[in-house]
Image: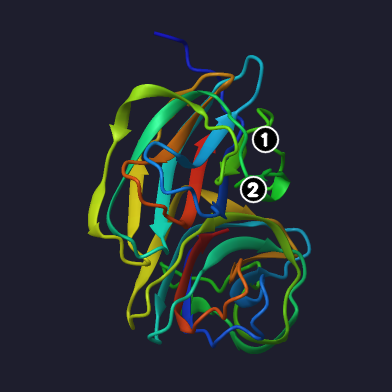
Amino acid sequence: MATLEPRTGRYGVGGRNNATAATINHCIGALFNPHGTKSIYVILFTWASISGAASTTRYVQRITARGTPGVTVTPDIDNDYDALLAPISGAVLDLAAYSVQPTLAPPDFFRPKMTIDTPGNIEELYFGEQGLLLPAGTGIGLFQGAGTAVVGDLSFVWDE
Amino acid sequence: MSLSYRVAGRSVVSSGAGADAVGCALWNPHATMDLTVDEVHFFQTTATVSNPGLVRTTTRGTQTTTVTPDIDNHDERLLAPITGAVLDLDYSADPTIAGPYLHRLNLAAVIGVGFIWVFNRGIRVPAGTGLALATPVAVLLQPGDVTFVWHE
């Protein structure tokens, strides 16, 4: 088991994706760690849909290549819970619609389904205070589990 | 002694329909002392969709409604906040926000929908800055009952 690295800070970032194509396995958004050597630890993930689509599913999965996102939110010092330092890892929040999809590393972590995807429904995935380790050059994304386009607000909290 | 505080109030609808309009904020006016926010609660009081996001502020703006916590807002009822932290609930001129947003959600058009954000490690609010609920998109942020919990 890898030795956990010392952590210097906790970060949070949120954003809203643009509509994905109505295609299964398309990425809605992802936290990607582009650093060459440094790992990060995902503490919390939340998703709040605004699309109101019926019978949608989504799943959370690791990614091994970033793909080409439609929009990227780049966290800075204001996203540090201590307001001291921009993320050393350079971690970013990528949002749909992707022109090149990220590379999935199955199987799924988490696969919620809502019979009707009512606006404001909130899904939350808490990995505990130790967090889910994201090695350098990898990420974790939210993907469409059905051929239904969804739009919503995606937030990640992580340590590094 | 723990210097843990909580304060609550009802915000009004954000001014204007532009993106980044602020609904309410905890402002730390102290010149040198930081505070750390542990929880933010918000429950909407209108049946209209809303898109609250959590974001830092670097100026207070011009507030028209403010709750000033005193000794009764201290969990141990011993001391008013040393920082002088206040809860601003309405503005004639909005604070200056410092994005990107830390967290985002959206709320359905139902009275009483809301959330409780718990920050296990706390979010530090440096002296002379604030932490606000604002709308990241060009949709009015609806009024609601808001609570900030912090320590200093």
Judge whether B8 appears above or below A108 on screen: below
| Viewer-nearest residue: A17 or B106 | A17
- Tag 2: residue type? Asn
Query: Dot 1: within a 10 Å radius of its alpha carbon, few (fewer than 14), some, or many (20 or more) residues?
Result: many
Give x and y (percent) for residue A57: 29, 47
From this view, report whether residue B100 is shown above or below residue B70.
above
Q: Between residues A128 and B113, which one lies in front from this camera angle?
A: B113
From the viewer's perspective, is B139 left or right of A123?
right
B62 relative position to A89: left or right: right
Residue A79 is tagged as 2
Could you tell me residue A12's position as x and y percent? 56, 46
Subunit of mark 1? A
Which residue occupies 41% across, 50% down? A46
Instruction: Check residue A87 in the rendering and tell me which mark sits there, or answer none.
Output: 1
- Image position, residue B89 (x, y; %): 58, 83
Residue at left 60%, top 83%?
B14
| Kind of residue sitting beneath label 1 | Pro
Q: How many labels does the image show?
A: 2
Label 2–label 1 contact, CB within 8 A: yes
x and y percentages locating residue B4 in the rendered image: 48, 62
The first of marks 2 and 1 along the sequence is 2
| Nearest the eye: B33 or A78 | A78
Residue A130 in view (yes/no): no
